[in-house]
Image: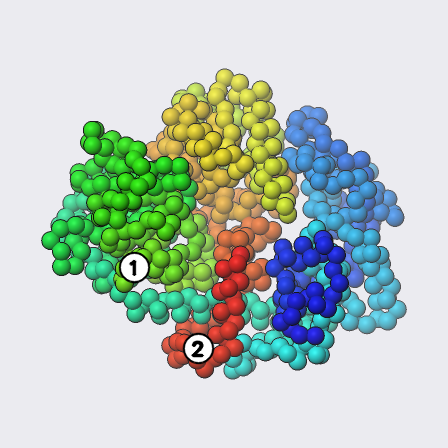
């Protein structure tokens, strides 16, 4: 058997299994061995229903019965009720605000249910249990391994690995597959990319040992040591990548942006407000970078509302006030990329305001149309123009500032002297993308990346290892701190009363419906769309009949979304019921309330970002956080929202008590679950960063570390595929 050959060379698979492995990105034997368990169980750990007591957190394997979507008879909360049965009895299960559970799990499904035993003696139920489907053989295994274990008394059988499940693969199947390949013959082919001296100084097992330990540990300590090694490896690799990128950038040339200081000062003085100290410091750091002629790579991180646009506008101003080298006319150019059309348009309008006293052309390019400011006929307005015309002016340098969505980075867009790229809320924008944007230009444009996504320090050190960091850690004065209230189900009427009061005063509100964790994204979107629609109907009928209510969710077309947002902006709509698609940067100052349903399904930093939607004006803003579960721990966790001073604190808290989906590493950052674990450990991250930088300093091309070099290349091509 060969490590780099496809699994299918050695294993006969049915189609669903093939599809499942495909989805998991497992092709070769090596991939399979790098598919790690999520946790370990001690055989026979599941509880029996007859023995459950109130207050206990329990995992029970059993069959579902009488699954039914209902409404709470007093609260009218939509929910699912059913029963779970095992050999010893049955217990009721309740899922509040999750009527769809009844559709996802048919009667008779064998599941493992994990949740809190609630209620009084004789009326016990499992509250919002998490369900995992279990195969029949697997449930037999629970019992079998218990027996083996009791007979032999051997520790070896006590732990078994639990792998993430999906359609086509069960944990048990994965365990067998791994066992088949975890042989001496295969292990002998394993080469460790991490230099031996590093492993030694951090007491980490070799790759070979770690593979055995992670899949078939005899003791938890072995599994932990193995996981620590893989965590170190992942962070180390990312740091190497970023370190190399940084070293490469340092050698590149860029434009020396050198606008006259008094003019930049005047631009800042013309803001309709006084810049905060944090804004001034950020502007200084950026101007210093851009003056040097080496490409700037800077991340500007600041909470929603901290005023990043003004900083970006000033950087843009400095660029457009600079002549291209050796030329008597023309200016350097700026590209500003936003994640959505709505946002691109908003930035376009803000830029028009910031540049009010400066006669420059500003362009907007999105998938659905192009615009130019000012219009020929009306100097205060913008006007639609053809794409061809816009691109011609951009290529000729007549439009110095171009704002847009991803449409900006298409091949047909070429600048004359692109000196600065500003990007908003894009998690990674690598050197290659930058070079592509520069087209034939031999100089790399400066990069200003902006984000309001509060992330923990360790994550920033890792994913943004190639960027210099500036924090905008100060809010503009005069903002009233948002009032955040945790709303228990019984307190809903009070919260709605407050909303009524504010709506009457002419304010607007968002109602956010919960994220739905469903392995199939299409289904999740459908369920979310359904819950948004249902909630909007309920609010219109029972709570806010006199107000205009609209919905916004990810299943709608961009045009539909834009229309709804436009109507909300114009206050033709009072209440917008939405999924978390409104999370990023939408600016409607008159919307001062946000009511978040199913709040425990969001991470704290995500909740923080959501409530950032309503701190856009000087009106008092309110955030109502309404969890589905009444659990003490949920309430305690959410309380952090009322006490934390900023988003960064919440991000740290999220990381430490990370539950499913709270910091979705793979999707957002390209970091595996094990890598995310590593980020809880600042020392480990700093060590990996330190070692990576040292290594690059001594051997930038990694000529003396061929295994590392190859591993990096493999990582890069894998990331590219994803
Ligand atoms: P961010 O992009 O960081 O979320 P914006 O740049 O959109 O924030 O700014 C939010 C709002 O605050 C805008 O309406 C902007 O005009 C205003 N603003 C920015 N800086 C200041 C300041 N120093 N003082 C008062 N208002 C400000
Ligand atoms: Mg912004």
Rendered view: 485 above or below 475: above
Residue name at image x 69 percent, y 41 percent = 128
Percent x, y of residue 652: 49, 55
Percent x, y of residue 346: 34, 37
The residue closer to the viewer here, 586 or 375, is: 375
Does the image show residue 291?
Answer: no
Looking at the image, which residue sits at the far left?
A: 328
Rendered view: 493 above or below 633: above
The residue that label 2 is drawn on is 702
Q: Secondary structure at mark 1?
A: loop
Disc 1 to disc 2, C-alpha distance: 28 Å
If the image is split into quadrants, where does the N terminus sit?
A: bottom right
Looking at the image, which residue sits at the far top?
A: 546
Residue name at image x 36 percent, y 36 percent = 369
The residue that label 1 is drawn on is 440
Q: Quadrant of residue 349?
A: top left
Percent x, y of residue 605: 49, 47
Rendered view: 295 above or below 499: below
């Amino acid at each position: 058997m060969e490590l780099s050959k496809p699994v299918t060379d050695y294993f006969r698979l049915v189609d669903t299994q093939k599809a499942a492995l495909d989805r998991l990105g497992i092709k070769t034997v090596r991939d399979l061995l790098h598919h790690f368990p999520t946790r370990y169980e001690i055989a026979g750990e599941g509880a029996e229903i007859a023995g459950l007591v109130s207050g206990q957190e329990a995992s029970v394997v059993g069959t579902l019965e009488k699954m039914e979507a209902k409404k709470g008879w007093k609260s009218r909360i939509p929910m699912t009720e059913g029963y779970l049965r095992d050999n010893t009895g049955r217990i009721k299960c309740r899922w509040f605000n999750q009527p769809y559970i009844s559709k996802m799990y048919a009667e008779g499904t064998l599941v493992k249910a994990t949740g809190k035993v609630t209620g009084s003696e004789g009326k016990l139920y499992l509250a919002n249990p998490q369900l995992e489907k279990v195969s029949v053989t697997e449930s037999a295994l629970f019992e079998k391994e218990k027996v083996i274990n009791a007979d032999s008394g051997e520790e070896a059988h006590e732990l078994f690995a639990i792998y993430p499940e999906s359609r086509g693969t069960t944990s048990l199947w994965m365990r067998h597959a791994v066992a088949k390949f975890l042989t001496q013959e295969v292990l002998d082919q394993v080469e460790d990319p991490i230099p031996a001296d590093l492993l030694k100084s951090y007491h980490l097992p070799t790759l070979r040992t770690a593979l055995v330990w992670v899949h078939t540990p005899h003791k938890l300590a072995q599994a932990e040591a193995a996981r620590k090694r893989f965590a170190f490896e992942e962070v180390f690799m990312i740091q190497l990548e970023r370190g190399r990128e940084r070293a490469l950038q340092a050698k590149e040339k860029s434009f020396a942006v050198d606008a006259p200081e008094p003019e930049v000062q005047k631009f800042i003085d013309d803001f309709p407000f006084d810049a905060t100290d944090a804004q001034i410091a950020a502007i200084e750091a950026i101007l210093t970078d851009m003056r040097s002629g080496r490409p700037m790579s800077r991340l500007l991180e600041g909470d929603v509302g901290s005023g990043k646009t003004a900083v970006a506008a000033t950087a843009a101003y400095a660029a457009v006030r600079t002549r291209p080298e050796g030329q008597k006319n023309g200016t350097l150019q700026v590209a500003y990329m936003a994640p959505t059309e709505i946002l691109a348009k908003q930035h376009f309008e803000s830029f028009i305001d910031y540049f009010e006293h400066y006669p420059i052309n500003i362009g907007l390019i999105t998938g659905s149309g192009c615009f130019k400011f000012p219009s020929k006929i009306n100097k205060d307005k913008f006007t639609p123009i053809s794409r061809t015309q816009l691109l011609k002016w951009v290529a000729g340098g007549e439009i110095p500032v171009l704002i847009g969505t991803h449409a900006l980075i298409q091949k047909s867009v070429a600048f004359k002297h692109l000196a600065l790229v500003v990007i908003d809320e894009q998690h990674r924008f690598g050197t290659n993308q930058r070079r592509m944007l520069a087209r034939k230009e031999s100089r790399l444009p400066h990069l200003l990346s902006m984000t309001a996504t509060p992330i923990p320090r360790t994550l920033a050190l890792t994913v943004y290892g190639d960027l210099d960091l500036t924090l905008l850690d100060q809010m503009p004065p005069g903002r009233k701190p948002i009032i955040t209230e945790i709303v228990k189900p019984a307190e809903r009427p009070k919260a709605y009363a407050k909303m009524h009061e504010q709506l009457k005063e002419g304010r607007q509100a968002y109602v956010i419906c919960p994220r739905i964790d469903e392995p199939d994204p299409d289904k999740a979107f459908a369920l979310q769309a359904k819950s948004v629609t249902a909630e909007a109907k309920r609010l219109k009928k029972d709570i806010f009949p006199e107000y205009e209510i609209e919905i916004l969710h990810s299943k709608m077309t961009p045009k539909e979304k834009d229309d709804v947002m436009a109507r909300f902006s114009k206050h033709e709509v009072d209440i917008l019921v939405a999924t978390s698609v409104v999370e990023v940067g939408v600016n409607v100052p008159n919307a001062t309330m946000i009511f978040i349903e199913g709040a425990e399904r969001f991470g704290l930093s995500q909740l923080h970002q959501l409530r950032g939607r309503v701190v856009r004006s000087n009106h008092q803003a309110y955030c109502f956080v309404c969890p589905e579960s009444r659990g003490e721990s949920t309430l305690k966790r959410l309380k952090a929202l009322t006490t934390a001073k900023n988003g960064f604190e919440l991000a740290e808290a999220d990381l430490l008590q990370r539950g499913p989906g709270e910091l979705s590493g793979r999707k957002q950052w390209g970091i595996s679950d094990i890598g995310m674990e590593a980020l809880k450990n600042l020392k480990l991250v700093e060590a990996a960063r330190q070692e990576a930088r040292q290594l690059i300093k001594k051997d930038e091309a990694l000529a003396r570390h061929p295994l590392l070099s190859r591993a990096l290349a493999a990582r890069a091509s894998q990331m590219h595929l994803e």
